[in-house]
Amino acid sequence: MSELDRTQPPTSGSIRKFDFPDVERRTLSNGLDLRVCKLSRLPVVSTNLFFRAGEGRLVGSRAGLAVLTGDALEGGTRKRSGTELAEAMERIGARLGVSTGWEGTSVSMSCLADRLEEALGLLTEAVLEPAFPEEEVDRAREQQLAAIRQRAMDPSALASMEAGRRYFTAGIPYARPQDGTEESIGTVKRGLLSDFADACYRPLGGGLIVAGDLDPDEIETMANQRLESWTGAPPAAQEFRVDPATRERRVWVVHREGSLQSEVCVGHVGTDRATPDYFPLSVANMLFGGSFTSRLNLNLREKNGFTYGVRSRFGFRSRPGPFSVSTSVGTDVTAPAVREIVRELEQLVEGGPTDEEVAAARDYAAGVFGLQMETAGQIASRISQLVVYGLEDDYYHTYRDRVRAVTTDEVAAAARAHIRPHEVQVVVVGDADEIVAPLEALDLGPLEVARAS
Amino acid sequence: MSRLTIPVERHSLDNGLKIVLSQDRTVPVAAVNLWYGVGSRNEAEGKTGFAHLFEHMMFQGSAHVPKNKHFELIERAGGTLNASTWFDRTNYFETVPSHDLELALWLESDRMGWMVQAMDQEKLDNQRDVVKNEKRQRYDNQPYGDWDERLQALVYPQSHPYHHSVIGSMEDIDAATLDDVASFFQTFYVPNNAVITIAGDFDRDGALELLNRYFGEIEPGEPIPPLPGDPLLDPLIGETVREHVLANVPLPRVVMAFRIPPYSSDDFAVAEVSRGLLGMGRASRLYRRLVRERRVAKGVVTFAFPLLTGASMLLAWATGYPGASPEELEAALAEELEGLAEADAVEVERAIALIETDLVRALERASERADLLSMFELHFDDPDRLNRELHRLRSVTVDEIRAFAKERLGSDNRAVLTYEPKAPA
């Protein structure tokens, strides 16, 4: 055996080619978009039914109604009480997951493959025949109200809620919390939920995604049987324009009694999922604050020890979502940390990234993509994104090539186009008595202090 | 599913390093996973939180790997990595595209063999700050964030190694020195106290050869010293111990914990399935009764901690609605827990079905398979135990669950931690 040279990293072996698995696309008799991915790995199946009943279609006075309606699905159907529905699913090892976002509602379920037919029957019963019993609706509403109250004392939730309010113009959905407010939810009764579900729980524009150890023809037959009576489209959603609340850089301090740390969000309105800059901008974000070895994390954590971690993120939605840097930092280093974040933003936009950084971020993004194709759940949620955002069928098959084709110039241009250091809103939730003076001394812009309610 | 058939192959090196290989070439992903037999239970008085701080130091470079390089190289390869510290162990793991398996082995072997040479005061001070911020972010500045620290102190006596939390105390973290780092490394980070597992896509002979090359020349250490304090415990707490906390929390919450048999005991399966009956899924006892029917709780959470030393811990918490009385919430929670003594067979089947789906779904990922295999090797000398997990859980009977409820969930074995919202100033 030759002497081992430990001073250099070993060279890579030969790459094994591996593609995103094939997806069969069919249209059910009711117009629902069916996507099936056969995986013969373990005998498990992940299913996801998506329809366009999202919070993005609700103005402020109804904020949170889509979330509440989704959560109240577990209240039972015309055939079964809530507990009977849960028992029927859980007895076969399946669980219903409902999640409602800006774009729509997803009802998902994982089960062992030999239980799929039964489980799919229960999933469709829950969505197509919800009973919304009054007691269950009241309970779901009280739970949501309690969650809203909990959020008001959770520093990071408080910061991201305040950030939404400061980034976006007042009155549009993105400016408010996804699950609404005490005012918008407080008096909601079952009639509103069943009306919302009647109108918006409709197949057109949605999709059924199934991944796992299964036969696509059988799935199609099964789904057609279960869903043929489910027809129509949700009403057109009210359009809204997404604009920044202000173009002036400002600092917003939310005083939270007894804070031992400051929660920081720095950002502004970003861009939408359909942007032609999606790939270069994703690479820009990766090297700026999207990985452990990003500029922000190496500076704030590994060099300065200000934080346990810092991230930047573009929330790509059907309309422009937020671009935000977020972190929790020690109270005494709040101002230095904010100064470093703003400085890093300026340096990225003015100086651009290096070729080496871009190459590293590209390699990371392309490589990690391949790691996230192991499970039926991962594959199903990827395919769901195609439906939600209307991406091309071959999107994932060309994904890595498109990431690898991104150039340094494109990354620099995307950062310049979508990141505006002089327009950021700096939101800090912490002990105002300790942090206001040092933040003012940074002279970033007008500073306002509010008290956490 | 009748039984699991995860391939398991065991080896060991002359220096004592244990090896588990589990090949599955379906996707080109390889998971490397190391378990070191050291955790917060090995921390002496005045050194709480050190095992976790040390875990951070393991990412600060080693003799041939500069600071940040470990993350940089793995991310560049398109891999993911992390580590975690727990009561009984510390684990380190990378998942990489399979053609970069050797990179992960080079990095892990360099820090197992030659970490301490690369340490300096600046790195220690930096990671001390990072860890203190982690403690503030996850525990101290978080509503209810100190629950585990408080609960452990109630369930385990001062002399027991589980009396203190994994994150430790600020004072002890402040007091840590470079000498502590060196001696901890020499004592615990030795091949004879570690397991390495590779799961996923790799060539068997090639992998064994690489493991030999990279890890074979690392010197073994001394035998691992016995645990500090007194690991022996009465199986029951003996009474109801309680702590009432008036805090800046939004809603009242009652956390209840019970001593249960250690993870290594055959009886632990009964506790696991009991926990499923109580808290897994929306048809579980606590969700159905407290959240749905009686509407006294906004939410319920249950855990059965898999702990090795003396006794493990089952816990259940219920979060009440605004203005609710913590006493009434506690009484309702206690009543439903005790009600497990009337469990029926249908509930047992339901819980086992959910546990089974969760396990099979976890096994879809090479990283999860590797982690479980490392655990079974380190704690039980038996990685193939993974393939018998379903059998172990399915053999639990309703009579055992009922007996468990009577023996373990009563007022003579109960720690109660209550959070009550402070009135607004």
Image (spheres, coloured by chain):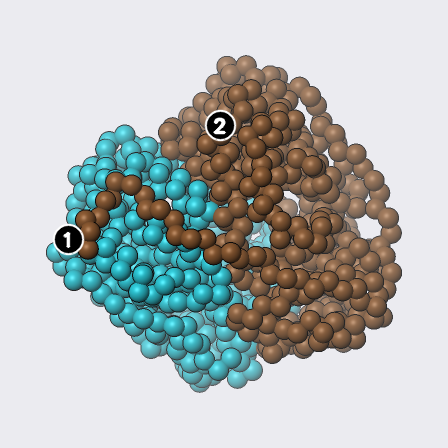
Residue at the image point whose x is 79% and y is 64% from the top: A27
Disc number lying in front (1 or 2): 2
Residue at the image point whose x is 22% and y is 65% from the top: B12
Residue that mark 2 sits on: A354
Q: Which chain is cyan?
A: B
Colour chain A appears in: brown
Identity, as a three-letter code, of the amino acid under mark 1: Glu
Dot 2 falls on a residue whose secondary structure is loop
Image coords of residue B419 (percent x, y) = 48, 51
Image coords of residue B22 (percent x, y) = 37, 67
Q: Quadrant of the N terminus of chain A?
A: bottom left
Q: Nearer the viewer, residue B354 or B297?
A: B354
Number of other residues with Cα within 10 Å of mark 1, as a class: few under 14, some 14 to 19, many 20 or more: some
Labels 1, 2: one chain:
no
Residue that mark 1 sits on: B219
In the image as oriented, which residue stretches furthest toward the left? B222
Left or right? Give the position of A220 relative to A329.
right
